[in-house]
Image (cartoon, grey):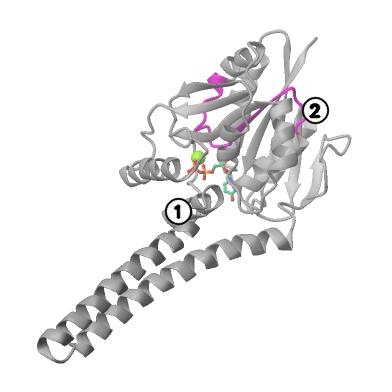
Amino acid sequence: MTKLLSVVVSVYNEELALREFYAETGKILKRLPGNWDYEFLFVNDGSRDQSLSILKEFAASDEKVKIVNFSRNFGHEAAMIAGLDYAGGDGIVCMDADLQHPPECLPEIVEKFDEGYEVISMVRTRNKTAGLVKNVTSAAFYKLINHLSDVKFEANASDFFAVSKNAAEVLRNNYREKVRFLRGYVQSIGFEKTTIEYEARPRFAGESKYSLKSLFKFSINTILCFSDLPLKLGIYSGVITALFGLIMVIYTVYTWKIYGAPNGYATIVVLISFMFSVLFVIVGIIGEYIAILFAEIKDRPVYIVKDTANIKKNRSKDTD
Ligand code: UDP
Ligand code: MG
């Protein structure tokens, strides 16, 4: 029985890379082992350039090309979730449109599926393409998140991963959080897991859509989503400041006994500024978690689909 590989590609302003991506990846997919067929599932994430019309061109002449077109930009993560919703394959692989994720790995991926693996993480061996700052901050981020969270994140795991139909079903049904990090969930769902190493290529054309600022925000959100340690920090720092306060009280009483009068002003300034700074940090952390709860409770859609191409039935589980 032939199996179907769905290649999910998130596309945001990739007009310069799409033709090359389609040609090169298509060539490799046509040479997959005989028991595998393939489909492309392009998720157009509100591109403002010619990406959509290029995709429509592909879809018009090749029915293996499916398009899910968002009503606006919802972000890479939302695009991957839509990919999982709409992909009909027995194996689903998510990759970028800029050819940084080498399509040569696809035959190796289907081989792993054939061996019975259900979750395949693609691990970058080295990233010559990213600058020093990005590499160092990314390493620091993985160290921190692995320290804080129960979920073990594969360092250098990327948004290049493949999951079986079963694993995709789990991700699709149970991990629809509003602030999310798909890569982390992929690591945490269990199933037979394996990794494949690859060397990231330079971006084929265009520019990275992620600035350092957005990566920073992304990192903070991930820590908050996967760990409640920051919340517990409130209790720890409360205990520590209480102890500190107690020492200050003893010290103040002591100096009062010895010198007749406490050194009031200095003591108060030290105590108040210290206590308030700790307090504000704790309030800030609680605020961040409330923001996540707020987004969850509002339950706005993860993405909105404007139209699709070459997708016959509505594969999406629900409308968001
Ligand atoms: N992307 C997307 N929506 C966005 C930003 C990016 O679908 O809001 C896509 C983009 O077209 C690319 C992939 O996500 O296929 C990764 O983006 P990019 O290459 O800019 O990130 P980097 O590789 O630099 O981390
Ligand atoms: Mg890229």
Residue 127 position, x and y percent, is 39, 33
Q: Which residue is mark 2?
A: 63
Magenta segment range?
A: 87-105
**SS for tag 2?**
loop
**Residue nearest the viewer, comparing 197 with 129:** 197
**Is disc 2 surrounded by few (<14), some (14 to 19) or many (20+) residues within 10 Å?**
few
x and y, in percent, of residue 170 in the image: 72, 34
Q: Residue furthest right?
A: 313
Counting from the top left corner in percent of width and height, residue 82 is at: 72, 42
Q: At x 73% / y 39%, what residue is drawn?
A: 172
Q: Give whichever of 158, 280 is nearer the camera.
A: 280
Vertical position of residue 286 compared to residue 178: above or below: below
Looking at the image, which residue is at 49% across and 43% down?
A: 149
Q: Position of residue 147 (x, y in %)?
A: 41, 42
Where disc 1 sits, the SS reads loop
Residue 113 vs 140, above or below: the answer is: above
Q: Is 300 rendered above or below residue 42?
A: below
* Ligand 1 - quadrant of the structure image: top right
- Return the residue nearer the eye: 294 or 100: 294
Residue farthest bottom in this picture: 261
